[in-house]
Amino acid sequence: MVVATMECDVMNKKTIRVSKKRQITIPLEFYEKLNLGNEVECALKDGAVIIRPIRRNLGDDFSEELLEELISQGLSGQKLMEQFRIERANFKQGAQKMLKEAEEIALGTKPSESFEDVFGSEE
């Protein structure tokens, strides 16, 4: 059985085992400290495996545009905040769905649509 060592910024070290299926268990204190979810980013750097949390802030980049749209609709105060929270959640769900669909297309588990399917024929 192979043994791997994980390090974090404060140089906490733990020795963990790698299973025959190449699986590892991330120590709970590391998992909680990094607020890891169901996926992590894994990279090779200088002969080491780097495992980092994935930070996807879907919807955060469009918050200003969303607020501008809601204000243009005459919303303000508490109603603005309530509708903003609803719209932001909807946007995040839509973006996550698009990312999942793009991953499925990239993996070949879902067919992609052609140019004609999306925009119609050029004739």
Image: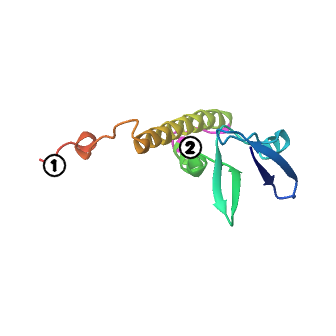
Picture quarter containing residue 90?
Answer: top right
Q: In this view, does 83 lie to the left or right of 51?
A: left
On screen, residue 110 above or below 62:
above
Q: Give the extent of the magenta segment.
A: 70-77
Image quarter (top left, top right, bottom left or bottom right) of the N terminus: top right
Say which residue label 2 marks: 71
Say which residue label 1 marks: 122
State if disc 2 and disc 1 touch (CB < 8 Å): no
Q: How far apart are marks 1 and 2 (CA)?
A: 39 Å
Amino acid type, residue under disc 2 in the picture: Ile
Q: Does the magenta stretch include residue 21?
A: no
| Residue in the foreground of this view, choosing between 30 and 59 | 30
Relative image position of residue 42 (x, y in whole percent)? 64, 52
| Residue in the foreground of this view, choosing between 123 and 34 | 34
Relative image position of residue 20 (x, y in whole percent)? 67, 39
| Residue in the foreground of this view, choosing between 111 and 65 | 111
On screen, residue 60 above or below 81:
below
Q: Does the magenta stretch include residue 74?
A: yes
Identify the disc placed on residue 57: none
- Residue at 81% across, 55% down: 8
Q: How many marks?
A: 2
Q: Is residue 112 left or right of residue 88?
A: left
Residue furthest out toward the front: 1
Residue 23 is at least partly visible in this image: yes
Amino acid type, residue under disc 1 in the picture: Glu
